[in-house]
Image (spheres, rainbow, N blue to C red):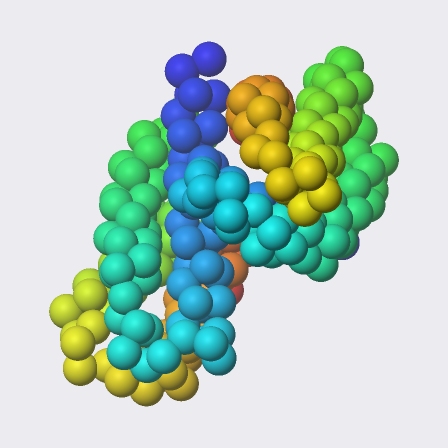
Amino acid sequence: MYNLLKIIHILSAVCFLTSMVYCVYLWLSQRNPRFISIIFQRIQTHTWQIIVPFIVVQLLTGFTLFSLQPQKFPEGWGKTVAIHFIVVIASWLGFVYLLLMSYKQKLLLNRHSSYRRWQGFLLVIGGLALFEMVFRMASVD
Amino acid sequence: MLINIIKFIHIIFVLILCGATIYCLAQVTAKKYALASLQNDTVTRLNKIILGCLGVAAVTGTLLVYPKHFTFHTPWIQAAYLFVVILSASIFLLLLFRKSLRSRWILGGSYVGLGVVLIAVIHDAVTKHTVW
C-alpha cells in the first residue's frame, strides 16, 4: 500500500511538473503581446486539466503517505514541506492570474501590460520553493 | 549532507528524464503535428536531453550505492543498470533512425515502452525489489 502510493505520488509529480515546465517554456518563448490570448488559453487549459488534478493527487497521496508512516519523517518535516507546497501553488496561481490580467488589458484596452516582471518573480519564488521541497524529500529514506 | 545533495541531483535528473519522455510521447502522438515534423527539432533535442539525463542519473545513482548500504550485487540495482542500458540503447536508436522512422505508431510505441521501463526503475527504487 505504502509503496504503491509512493509510486503514484512520484508519477503524479512528474506529470504536473512536466505540464508546469511546458507552460513556463511557452510563456518564455513567446514574448510578442499579440500571442497573449493563445498562450493564456493554453496555460489555462494545462492548469485546469493537468496541473490542478495532479496537485490534488499529490496532496492526497502525500498526506496518506505521511499518516501511514509518520516515524519515517523528521520532526517538523511535514509542516515545512506543506508550507513549501503552498508557496508553489500560490505562486503558480498568481502567475496564471497575472496572465489573465495581461490578457484582459490586451483585449479590452489594447495595451501591453507590465506584469511580465512580476510573473517572472513569482516563477522564481515557486521554483526555489519547489527545489527546497524536493531537497527535503530527498533527505528522507 | 553530501549524500543528500547527490540524491537531490539524482531525483531532479530522473524527474527531467521522465518529464521529457512524457512530453515526447505527447508530441509524437498529437494529431496536429504533421508526420514530417514528428522528427522535429524539439523531439530530437529532448532525446539528447534524455540521453544526458540518463548519464547523470546513472553516475549519481552509482555514487549512492555504497553510502546507502547497498552493493553492486543487489538484484534491483543490477536490474536498474540493465534498464539504463536498455533506455540508452533505445534513445540512441531513435536518434540514429529519426529520419527513417515515419510511423506515428512506432514512435508513440517506443515512448510508451520507454515509459514502462522508467516506471519499472521507479518501482524497483521504491520497493527495493526488482520486477525483472
- A25 or B17: nearer the eye? A25
Q: Quick check: can you spot residue B89?
A: no
Q: Is residue A102 above or below residue B116?
A: above
Which x, y percent locates residue A45? 67, 57
Q: Residue at x 76, y 14 (%)?
A: A75
Q: Quick check: can you spot residue B16?
A: yes
Name which quarter of the figure residue A110 lies in: top right
Q: Is residue A117 above or below residue B49?
A: above
Which x, y percent locates residue B98? 20, 73
Q: In screen coordinates, is A131 left or right of B100?
A: right
Residue extending farthest front: A109
Q: Residue at x 54, y 22 (%)?
A: A117
- B104 or A105: nearer the eye? A105
Name which quarter of the figure residue A105 lies in: top right
Q: Is residue A121 above or below residue A40?
A: above
Q: Residue at x 57, y 55 (%)?
A: A38
Q: In screen coordinates, is A79 left or right of B103?
A: right
- B32 or A64: nearer the eye? B32
Q: Is residue B116 above or below residue B99?
A: above
- B39 or A8: nearer the eye? B39
Which x, y percent locates residue B74? 40, 47
Which x, y percent locates residue A122? 62, 24
Q: Residue at x 41, y 63 (%)?
A: B24
- Quarter occupied by the C terminus of chain B: bottom left
